[in-house]
Image (cartoon, coloured by chain):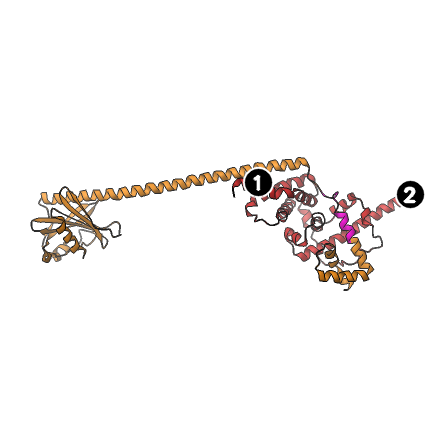
Amino acid sequence: MSEEGQNVRFEQVALPHLGAAYNLARWLVRNDEDAEDIVQEAFLRAFKFFGGYRGGESRTWLLTIVRNTCYSWLQRNRARELTDSLDETQEDLAVDFASPESVLMKSVDARVVREALDGLPIEFREVMVMREMEELSYKEIALIADLPIGTVMSRLARGRKRLHSMLADRTNLKTNARGGAAS
Amino acid sequence: MMCQETGMLIHALADRELDLVKSIELETHLQQCPSCAQTQQEIRGLKSLLNDSELRHVPTKSFEKRLRAVLSEEVKEGSASRVNWWRWSYAGISLVALLLVVWVVVGTLNRQSSGELIAQEVVSSHVRSLMAQHLTDVPSSDQHTVKPWFDGKLDFSPPVKDLTQQGFVLTGGRLDYIESRPVAAIVYQRRQHPINVFVWPARDQAKTAVQASVRQGYNLIRWTSAGMEWWAISDLNLAELQQLTQLLQQ
């Protein structure tokens, strides 16, 4: 293949995933400017490694590079966010969803959801973003995050549980505050 | 299925990652267990909350523009450096090819001219040996006298053959100097014709074919065998000189 062909091909392969790349980076570092820098760095890296790209799922390939770039950036700039060691002990996953203050989720404001998700440890945040927003399969997430599929599943389950209880608390607070103001 | 078993499976079901058999088992349980069914509802609600385009972070147009510019710059640079690399490697390959051709040509010329030079030296030595009445240092028809005489005078032991029976009378040996080294000259006589046979270790160990030539009226025959370079020269006719060379090669 000619050089020109390869360059055109890189842009064709990588640029369609800019949205997914930026979304993931932005959710991981939680800041617009940093996310932009990281995505740019990741694309340049991807271009450098493009010779090693052998077809296949280009989105998974690119997101792997984006995620790695995010983690090395965080390691350099905000190592503290990564050192919060994750308690991997099994929580009881079945209960607690059906709590009495169970909320009708559809009524929750997107801003509240965003804040709650931002508040989750990065390990949960990333699998949830990849699963719910990018609609990646467990297998793809496992590849990108370099995790066993079982860990992907348990992180998703636990992340959802945490997010659910955070949202339940907030909506209750809001409801209580409103109730308080009315009385 | 029990509630305790539904833990992660209920998420996998919501994510459509559960195989058919497990899905059916779980669905059956969900129909009978309000608590698990409630959990399923909450998970679905949560999923739809997160799958909201409002939550997605979208790159700004200006960032996209900037990224495209940076990429095309990088692509240009990258291909430029690769093109340069190719140019350099082409230049390198051409240079190597050129040097190879020069080396081969010069080598061939050298070999030819070194052959020429030796032939000239052989003729001169032959003529000088006749003019100066200095044909032999050790006049003897006995090969067992001639051969040992060279010991200590040369760094090799020249083969000396008695060919009197075949009509080539050994008349002696002499030291000579050809191709910048001392060589053995073994002198035979055929009727009235003196024959100088020059011998020295060949530089190139490969055996080369017998080459005959005529210079200044003298017949020259050169060959290599057993790691030795041989030159026979005489005013004898070529046929008889060839006969000698064949005898020497045996």
Residue contact at pointers 2 and 1, CB within 8 angstroms: no
Q: Residue at x 83, y 59 (%)?
A: B34
Which residue reaches farthest left? B192
Instruction: Residue type at mark 2: give it.
Output: Ala
How many numbered dots are placed on residues in this image? 2
Asked if marks 2 and 1 fall on the same chain, the answer is yes
Q: Which chain is drawn using orange?
A: B
Q: Which residue is mark 1?
A: A8
Residue A94's image quarter?
A: bottom right
Q: Residue at x 30, y 41 (%)?
A: B106
Q: Please say whether residue B115 is visible from this viewpoint.
A: yes
Q: Residue at x 22, y 44 (%)?
A: B115
Point out the tag, 2 or 1, that comes first from the N-terminus. Answer: 1
Give percent across and percent down for residue B27. Answer: 77, 60
In the rendered view, does B72 fall on the left or right side of A88? left
In the rendered view, does B64 fall on the left or right side of B145? right
Q: Is residue B51 located in the magenta-colored stretch of the structure? A: yes
In the rendered view, does B196 fall on the left or right side of B8? left
Front disc: 2 or 1 = 1
Along the line of sight, which residue is nearer the eye, B4 or B86?
A: B86
Instruction: Residue type at mark 1: give it.
Output: Val
Along the line of sight, which residue is nearer the eye, B6 or B243?
A: B243
User: Bounds of the magenta span?
Assistant: B43-56
Q: Which residue is mark 2?
A: A182
